[in-house]
Amino acid sequence: MTLAEKMLAAHTDKEKVSPGEFINVRVDLILANDITAPIAIREFRRIGVNRVFAPKKIVMVPDHFTPNKDIASAEQVKLMRDFAREQGIIYFEIGHMGIEHVLLPEQGLVLPGDVVIGADSHTCTYGALGAFATGMGSTDIAAAMATGDIWMKVPSTIKLVYHGSLGKWVVGKDLILYTIGNIGVDGALYSVMEFTGETIDSLSIDGRFTMANMAVEAGAKAGIFRVDNKTQLYIKSRAKRSYRVYEPDNGANYTQVIDYDVSNIEPQVALPHSPANATPVSQVGNIEIDQAVIGSCTNGRIEDLQLAAQVLKGRKVHPRVRCIVIPGSQEIYLDALTRGLIEIFVKAGVAVSTPTCGPCLGGHMGVLASGERCISTTNRNFVGRMGSPESEVYLSNPAVAAASAVMGRIASPEEILTKGIGHGKST
């Protein structure tokens, strides 16, 4: 069996599972947020069950429209809060929370070998820790909260093998954008993307979170990494329960094996309106921007903020650009503060936000007007994703987003450093 099949089989009463087979799977953790939880709660009430199956296996995080942007979002969060208190489930509130897919691993709630489902498409992020994690609809979440299991079809697995060393300013975001650009937004449709190779071995945990997060942008059911020493070190201080590490069998059956030589990959920029429109930054051309967003469940971790600060230190955001930095959690915010990153951002003319999904889904804290362009470290750049249907979103890694904020146009960090640009004047 593949890595995914091993984990799924262990959560059923079967010794072996195969792609295409329908199975009932026991879940270790269930997640919902301020958009999806209220629907799940209402459906849970309709089932007629009084109590959730296991309160400490359910987590609710208000992160999309928080701090509450209006009365409607306040009512959504109140419904979540009241349900969480009634049921005794795990709940994170303003000041103690973060973006859900940053927060849960950080708090040790997701561990290797877990089966995790979330009412959010980017639940696949947790595959970075060797978990089988996937997004589902709110009604499925309601049923799982009542029963503790899910009904699903076993996905096939595509093995992606990355060879070579990454160049300067090339990180996990560039690998996944390059991959999606190669296979397309449906290249892994209802499949598991298993990321391997010596490049992956040398990739940081934060970089792996970014890649797993965007597996769904290739249509994948999950994106999974094997557990290694880096994973164990990340887990060591966070785990509050036991966990099991799984390995794929030798000779496991993959529907496809794709090899990549990453040695010559540049930082990538995904042009509107698809993550698959990946282009080397040197070939993007002269595209002026109005906004830069650095954060989200894709790139809001400390390594991402360090990368942005490295570019912004001693420089100023272009006077025409609004640059917004959003730490992924309170812990990351505090870490960035103690490392001096927040000071670098403020001196550069950046707006630093409390943890929130905010502009990623056009929620708030950076919604775009008609005709505006934004470069963002988020995961999607569909039409109208960040606001007006007449706006444009370009996806990149944090260093490219920061360099673009300084230049006032999409630019490589190498360009800034080579030219010694420090005052944010477009050239």
Image: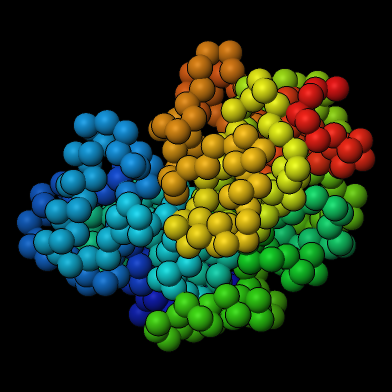
Position of residue 154 measured from the top left corner of the image (x, y, whole percent): 47, 62
**Does residue 291 appear to the left or right of 72 in the view shown?**
right
Number of labels in the image equals: 0
Q: Tell me the residue at 37%/76% (across/down).
A: 12
User: x, y (%) of residue 23?
Assistant: 37, 66
Q: In this view, does 229 lie above or below 109?
A: below
Q: Residue at x 49, y 84 (%)?
A: 244
Q: Which residue is drawn at 72% across and 20% down?
A: 288
* Relative side of 35 to 163, left or right: left
Indicate left or right for 361 with 31 as reference: right
- Residue 219: x, y in percent? 56, 45
Q: Is residue 119 above or below residue 226?
A: above
Q: Provide residue 157's location: percent of width, then percent of height.
A: 60, 61
Q: Report the residue at 49% width, 30% height from top.
A: 366
Residue 44 in view, yes or no: no
Quadrant into which the N terminus falls: bottom right
Can I make out residue 368 in this image?
Answer: yes
Foreground of the two, 360 or 149:
360
Whether residue 377 is situated above or below residue 381 in the rendered picture: below
User: Does residue 385 appear to the left or right of 179 in the view shown?
Assistant: left
Q: Nearer the viewer, residue 211 or 240?
A: 240
